Image (tube, helix red, strand yellow):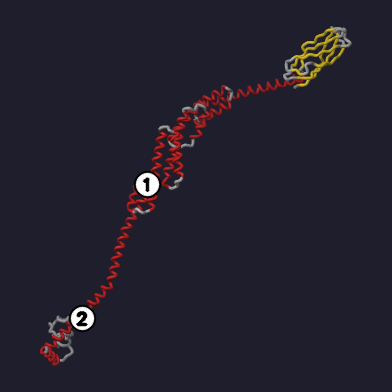
């Protein structure tokens, strides 16, 4: 059979033309579909007899194929031209993305180094923190936060070195120099409020306590009185740390010893309240101390006995004072003797010798008296002022009187009453 498109003879069982590739159309028994037997034979003869026509058809077919390929190639060129910017954009985007990935990796490394450096700094590992910051800065030299943190860490390293120097001075007991440098460092750190300096501030306080403890330990050797020791205890009782605890224990032991000694001395002086206070100062440091507990009981018993005796003395003194007061008011003038003689005119002349028996000075003393005969008859009465007018306790005074009626000396003179004023 033949291809009804190109006219080439085909195998009987062919479905497609082996020349033009089109599907073969088969109808009935003839090789040319749609034609009768006579028409098919005529056509076959015509084709066989006209090779020029066939070649023209073949040429036309090839030109069609070339045109088809040309159009395909043209369409392909236009497609390539259209896709070129997309391809360039895609390649550029890929390069940018690769660069972004690379830079992101560096940023991530820097971030991790920065975070780790910050943690090391907070833990007080300043050298390690600085090393990490320098590594991060090598990757990002212009990153300001890294530069600022590195500067702060270097400042912390200097402060740490200064603290080591201060501790060295404390160890050498150069307390004055240590105190000066400690205060200078405290002033510097006072201006730094960053968390990075938290550990340094803790170390600063530790150094301050260490300085105070060492100073107190040296001073303890020269403290011997309970007041000095208790005052020093008030200074160190709030300190913490092993050094402070050792000092507090040593100070407590010395307070206990000195409190017992001082309490015993005060007991001998009858200063019971002070003695008890001294014992209690020791018992405050060592409540279970048997010696101090016994001494406190001893002081309490002695105080009670003393107070009882003192009460008796007070009562006696009050009685004596009352007696003295009574004497001062009722028996201040004591008559020692009265001299009797006659004067030139034969009259009885009396001279009385008196003493101030009071415990206070007296003045303006007046004496009233009666003159009796040997038989007991009243011969005369009289009144006289004693001289001197002001008389100290125990001093003497006198009075003089002359009778106009009595002419004899064998008489009895009785002082009836005396008056005076107490000074």
Q: Nearer the viewer, residue 149 or 111?
A: 149
Q: Nearer the viewer, residue 103 or 304?
A: 103
Task: Tell me the tag on residue 65.
Answer: none
Q: Residue furthest left?
A: 49
Q: Is residue 337 left or right of residue 12?
A: right
Q: Secondary structure at mark 1?
A: helix
Image coordinates for residue 118, horizontal then vertical, percent? 38, 49
Q: Secondary structure at mark 2?
A: helix
Q: Nearer the viewer, residue 77 or 251?
A: 77
User: Does residue 210 appear in the picture of this structure?
Assistant: no
Q: For marks 1 and 2, give the CA distance.
A: 78 Å
Q: Residue furthest right?
A: 405
Image coordinates for residue 346, horizontal then vertical, percent? 87, 7
Q: In this picture, is 161 found above or below 291?
A: below
Q: Nearer the viewer, mark 1 or mark 2?
A: 2
Image coordinates for residue 93, horizontal then vertical, percent? 31, 65
Which of the 4 quarters of the picture holds residue 202? Answer: top left
Image coordinates for residue 263, horizontal then vertical, percent? 54, 25
The residue that mark 2 highlights is 67
User: Does residue 48 appear in the picture of this structure?
Assistant: yes
Sooner in the amino-acid sequence: mark 1 or mark 2: 2
Which quadrant does the C terminus fall into?
Answer: top right
Q: Is residue 377 left or right of residue 190?
A: right
For disc 1, the neighbor class at 10 Å (few under 14, some 14 to 19, many from 20) is: some
The residue shown at (16%, 90%) is: 35
For disc 2, the neighbor class at 10 Å (few under 14, some 14 to 19, many from 20) is: few
Q: In this picture, is 327 found above or below 169?
A: above
The residue shown at (75%, 14%) is: 396
Q: Nearer the viewer, residue 239 or 124?
A: 124
The residue that mark 1 highlights is 120
């Amino acid at each position: 059979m033949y291809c009804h498109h190109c006219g080439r003879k085909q195998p009987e069982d062919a479905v497609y033309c082996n020349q033009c590739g089109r599907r073969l159309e088969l109808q009935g028994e003839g090789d040319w579909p749609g034609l009768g037997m006579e028409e098919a034979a005529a056509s076959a003869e015509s084709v066989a007899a006209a090779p020029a026509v066939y070649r023209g058809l073949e040429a036309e077919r090839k030109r069609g194929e070339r045109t088809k390929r040309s159009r395909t190639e043209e369409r392909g060129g236009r497609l390539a031209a259209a896709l070129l910017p997309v391809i360039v954009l895609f390649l550029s985007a890929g390069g940018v993305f690769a660069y972004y990935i690379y830079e992101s990796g560096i940023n991530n490394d820097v971030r991790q180094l920065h975070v780790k450096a910050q943690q090391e700094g907070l833990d007080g590992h300043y050298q390690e923190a600085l090393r990490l910051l320098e590594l991060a800065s090598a990757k990002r030299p212009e990153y300001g936060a890294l530069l600022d943190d590195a500067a702060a860490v270097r400042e912390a390293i200097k402060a740490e070195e200064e603290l080591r120097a201060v501790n060295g001075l404390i160890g050498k007991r150069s307390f004055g120099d240590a105190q000066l440098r400690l205060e200078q460092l405290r002033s510097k750190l006072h201006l730094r409020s960053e968390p990075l300096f938290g550990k340094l501030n803790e170390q600063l306080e530790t150094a301050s306590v260490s300085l105070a403890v060492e100073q107190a330990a040296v001073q303890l050797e020269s403290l011997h009185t309970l007041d000095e020791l208790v005052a020093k205890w008030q200074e160190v009782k709030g300190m913490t740390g092993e050094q402070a605890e050792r000092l507090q224990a040593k100070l407590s032991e010395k307070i206990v010893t000195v409190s017992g000694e001082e309490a015993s001395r005060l007991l001998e002086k009858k200063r019971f309240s002070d003695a008890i206070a001294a014992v209690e100062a020791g018992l405050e440091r060592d409540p279970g101390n048997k010696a101090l507990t016994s001494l406190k009981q001893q002081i309490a018993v002695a105080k009670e006995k003393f107070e009882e005796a003192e009460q008796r003395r007070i009562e006696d003194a009050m009685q004596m004072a009352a007696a003295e007061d009574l004497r001062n008011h009722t028996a201040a003038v004591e008559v020692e003797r009265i001299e009797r003689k006659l004067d030139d005119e034969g009259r009885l002349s009396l001279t009385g010798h008196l003493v101030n028996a009071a415990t206070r000075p007296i003045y303006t003393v007046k004496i009233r008296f009666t003159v009796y005969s040997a038989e007991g008859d009243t011969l005369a009465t009289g009144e006289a002022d004693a001289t001197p007018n002001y008389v100290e306790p125990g001093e003497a005074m006198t009075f003089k009187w002359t009778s106009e009626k009595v002419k004899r000396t064998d008489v009895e003179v009785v002082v009836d009453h005396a008056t005076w004023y107490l000074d």
